[in-house]
Amino acid sequence: MIDFLIIGGGIAGLSAGARLSEHGTVTVLEAEDALGYHASGRSAALFEEGYGPPSVVALNKASAEFFFTNDYLTPRGLMLVAKSDQADQFRKDLSELGMAEISVADALERVPVLNPETVAYTALSEGAYDIDTDRVLQDFARTIRANAGSVLTRQKVTRIRKDGNWLVEAAEVFQARTIVNAAGAWADEVARMAGIAPIGITPRRRSMARLPAPGGHDVKNWPMMLGAGETWYAKPDAGKLLVSPSEADPVEPHDAYADDMVLAEGLARYEEMVTSPVTRVETNWAGLRSFAPDGTLVLGPDPSDESFVWSAGQGGYGFQTAPAASRLVADLALGRAPELDAAMVSALTVSQLR
Ligand SMILES: Cc1cc2nc3c(=O)[nH]c(=O)nc-3n(C[C@H](O)[C@H](O)[C@H](O)COP(=O)(O)OP(=O)(O)OC[C@H]3O[C@@H](n4cnc5c(N)ncnc54)[C@H](O)[C@@H]3O)c2cc1C
């Protein structure tokens, strides 16, 4: 009998599994051949403490120490970039993200391809970091195994029944006291299988293009650039530049791929702000950012059946919130008092949505 059966081998499932493996037996079931195949393998890997609604920011802040202590972060910086007709949006973003305005001339020193004819306002935050997401995923999986748990791939859950305990059918049948639903875009599907009311998760596609370094520049120390109103962003990645149109188009859960038209429009918005034209896209992809109706994570036991625990709605924040979110999932599943502020905790629970 398994104490905690986790459905989903992305960052949500592996981090929750690692926390819970210190308190009982854990098995993680992942449908695909590899861990992190969906959203968790396709992210921009950024940690920015001020990014997200208040309960997400609380989780970001509570996660920082874990990331720093384990050396998962590398300084990146975040630069906000706006045109002359985006003054209001620029001010709004600047205050939400707690950034400091800098002159366009100073911005050009950091990113020499910015176009001074189109870029009118710039701001900078040094509090943004690259997360070593592969290592985070693998380390959580290693913790589960070190605590005598199992992390199994090619185990797509197709049927869930309850007969005293949970009976979960995948490539094998598993019996568990508690289920943790960490199925990302498929979280409502898993809930329905278990006879639990869905919470209204909406998967939203976000595409990404990898470009050669613009103008042959060394981009290693460039900050991530964010178009005002999150209309595009660009981030250095292993000597190349990732550019995203920052779309949030609602879709059905599926193995996502980039939309060519959306990508082209996003690249045009980026291109307008730089002097180096996009000559070639080396590769592109997309992932699903899955949101609950209130835009925050949904964590902890379902009020209709406490042995069904949610870790869903990670949206665009699944990595940066994972250390604190997984601790909260474990606290709530184990009936322990959470470390996080009570108002924030209640904003993150299922009851909030019901
Ligand atoms: C383009 C992009 C950029 C992003 N940038 C950032 C960023 O900079 N910083 C940040 O913090 N976050 C970012 N995110 C968000 C982050 O990637 C997600 O919030 C996070 O990966 C979600 O993790 P998850 O484990 O919930 O979902 P997933 O990684 O999708 O994992 C869910 C898993 O459940 C499995 N599953 C589903 N159904 C079943 C079933 N029936 N049986 C077994 N397994 C099942 C799936 O196969 C999947 O592997 C970004 C996302 C995208 C797409």
Image (spheres, grey):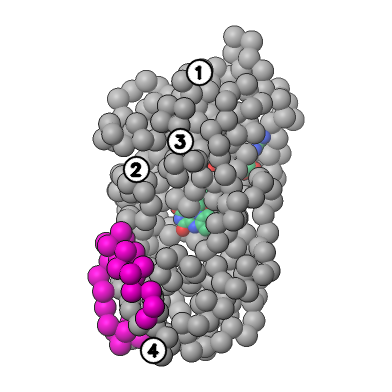
Compared with 105, 263 (above or below) is: above
- The image shows residue 68 at horizontal and vertical percentages of 32, 53
Q: Residue at x 42, y 37 (%)?
A: 326
* The label number, if any, that marks residue 55 in the structure image: 2
Q: Earlier in the sequence, mark 3 or mark 1?
A: 3
Q: Is residue 208 left or right of residue 317?
A: right
The answer to whether residue 121 shows anywhere in this view is: yes
- The image shows residue 238 at horizontal and vertical percentages of 52, 72
Q: Residue at x 28, y 34 (%)?
A: 343
- Label 4: which residue? 116
Which contiguous range is marked in magenta? 84-108
Q: CA distance from mark 4 to mark 2?
A: 37 Å
Going by the numbered disc 1, the residue's amino acid type is: Ser
- Determine the image quadrant of residue 162: top right
Q: Residue at x 49, y 41 (%)?
A: 293
- Determine the image quadrant of residue 196: top right
Going by the numbered disc 3, the residue's amino acid type is: Val
Q: Earlier in the sequence, mark 2 or mark 3?
A: 2
- Label 3: which residue? 298
Q: Earlier in the sequence, mark 1 or mark 2?
A: 2
Q: Secondary structure at mark 2?
A: helix
The verdict on residue 90 being magenta is yes
Q: Secondary structure at mark 4?
A: loop
Q: CA distance from mark 2 to mark 3?
A: 11 Å
- Label 1: which residue? 304
